Image: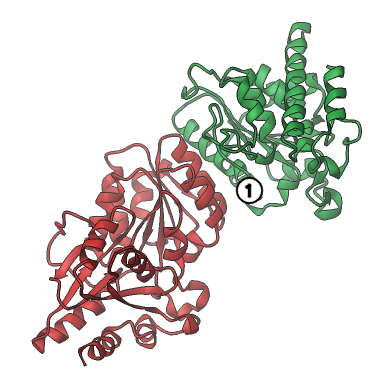
Chain colours: A green, B red
Amino acid sequence: MLYAQKQMSELFAKKLLEDVVRMTSEAKTSHVGGCLSCLDIISVLFTEVINIDKKNPNSKNRDRFILSKGHTAAIIYSALANKGFFSRKWLSTFIQDGTKLPGHIDHKVPGVEFSTGSLGHGLSVGLGMALSMRYNNIKSNVYVLVSDGEMNTGSTWEAIMFAAHHKVDNLICIVDKNKIQSFGETKDIINLDPLYEKWETYGWNTYDIDGHNHSEIKKAFIDSKKYSKKPSVIICNTIKGKGIKDFEGRLISHYRPPSEDQLNDILKGI
Amino acid sequence: MRNSFVENLVKYASKKKNVYLLTGDLGFSVLEPFIKKNPKNFFNMGVAEQNMMGVSSGLALEGNKVFTYSISNFATSRCHEQIRNDICYHDLDVTVVAVGGGLPYGTHGYTHHGIEDITITRCLPNMTVYVPADRLELEFCFNKIIKNTSPKYLRLAKGGEPDLYKKKISASGNVICHKKLSEINILSCGSILVEAIDCCDFYKEKGINVGLFSCPIISEETKPEIKKLLSKGKTFITLEEHKKIGGFGSYVSEISVSLEEPARVISCGVLSDGYDLVGNQKYLRSLHGIDKEGLVKVINKLLK
């Protein structure tokens, strides 16, 4: 990766980190852990990969992005605000009474394609978009970010099977494999592994990468865009709560808001 | 009615490029005319109704008009959250088409009794529920469906329902008058209308007029028409092949209680304690008291 590009996604990552820790800390709300696990993915995606334009948000040639793990809305709100889709001032209203920014991602927010919050919906919707785009010869891609816990849902597997059967190669799924779901570790609840082999067996072009390494993330996106005749999945191995020492790899990061001290530590680090 | 739906759809799709039909692996010997003419706009989604609703949402978001097809409970209960969150919350142009609404699959057992579907669809935001009684009411509804870009639930019976109209329906609103307003009136919803017509004819021979109105569209838009009828100080019997809880009778009652002087509304529908009775449609209508004879019993009591 060129130095300038690396700097772009990494600078963006710092903005996202500051925003999501501040938003969840000040609002005293949950789900910071899942925001931080996908932070580097979102950073690369929004700076290096997807083609979206705040001046023309409904352009038919735009890439579509769906956050299927809708509980980590804060990071997408931050990404969109930093891309100029709405004022950064909105971020301080996150989940407040009468806010435009609810705790689960909402399509009424400028730049958001689809509302989710109940897991297992996003991949099917992205699949429908991708089918229509293919039919209409639109050369853009649909990106859907799912969580590993979300892969418990039967609907996600319904979409996986259908997308492979119909060779929907403009659909790219990203799995934020942070290994922790609501009530414990994924391996103890419904073990997903070997996840790479499962996706591959189901007929997807599959990547397995370090979800915090910007070079690896970008390379996987570039390679997946070139691939034809199969949908692609990028399994990103991540750490839940990454960046807040006491939260890293811990279930508590799903629930506990960052304290004022934790927020200050993050701000100092940045 | 299934075949009439497909005829209407084929005709409509012949003028449009953006009409999609998705099925949950059902529709053998019904959907083929559409598939033959529009192979690229048809997907058999397999036995995967949740994905079907999600995919239909994605297609609709891209500007398409989407129809999904399945049996009543599979089309609604199994994937209710996808209909709620994906289709209705986003106010998408998707028509959930269900066959087997009511008791046409009565011999197949409770899993195939479509008797709660109106309750769980009509409560959703932006949703309009269409319950035609025969192929001409279906055409009447379909002409409204193609103009409606919000979520829709189209509840079909099965096939072979008798024609209840002699000519194309020309009603200006959503409520269709069969017999003018009287002291006692039946408000009917769906293919059960045939029983109401028989009942009205029975009383006509006796020189007693019973009013009859068919209400194939359950929506906010229909409410003023129902309200106007209910305001006349008469008695109304609601008739539906659906549980009384939350269905068409409840819809009419909700309108009635909003009046300063609520109307007398008597609800006839599938009984809660007989929901699992098995038998053919005629037999089950009789057990639930929603056939002609059942209606006659109710009206005779009122006439005493």
- Relative height, residue B75 to residue B270 (above, below): above
SS at mark 1? loop
Tell me what residue is drawn at x 21 percent, y 93 percent: B304
Q: Residue furthest bottom?
A: B304
Tell me what residue is drawn at x 79 percent, y 7 percent: A3
Q: Residue furthest right?
A: A246
Q: Position of residue B17 (x, y in %)?
A: 34, 36
Q: Residue furthest front?
A: B260
Q: Position of residue B283 (x, y in %)?
A: 37, 86
Kindly identify the amino acid type of the residue bearing the numbered disc 1: Ser
What crowding class fits label 1: few (fewer than 14 Cα within 10 Å), some (14-19), or many (20 or more)? some
- Residue that numbered label 1 is attached to: A118
Tell me what residue is drawn at x 91 percent, y 35 percent: A246
- Relative height, residue A6 to residue B57 (above, below): above
Closer to the camera in the image, A255 or B137: A255
Closer to the camera in the image, A99 or B286: A99
Q: Position of residue B11 (x, y in %)?
A: 26, 47
Closer to the camera in the image, B86 or A262: A262
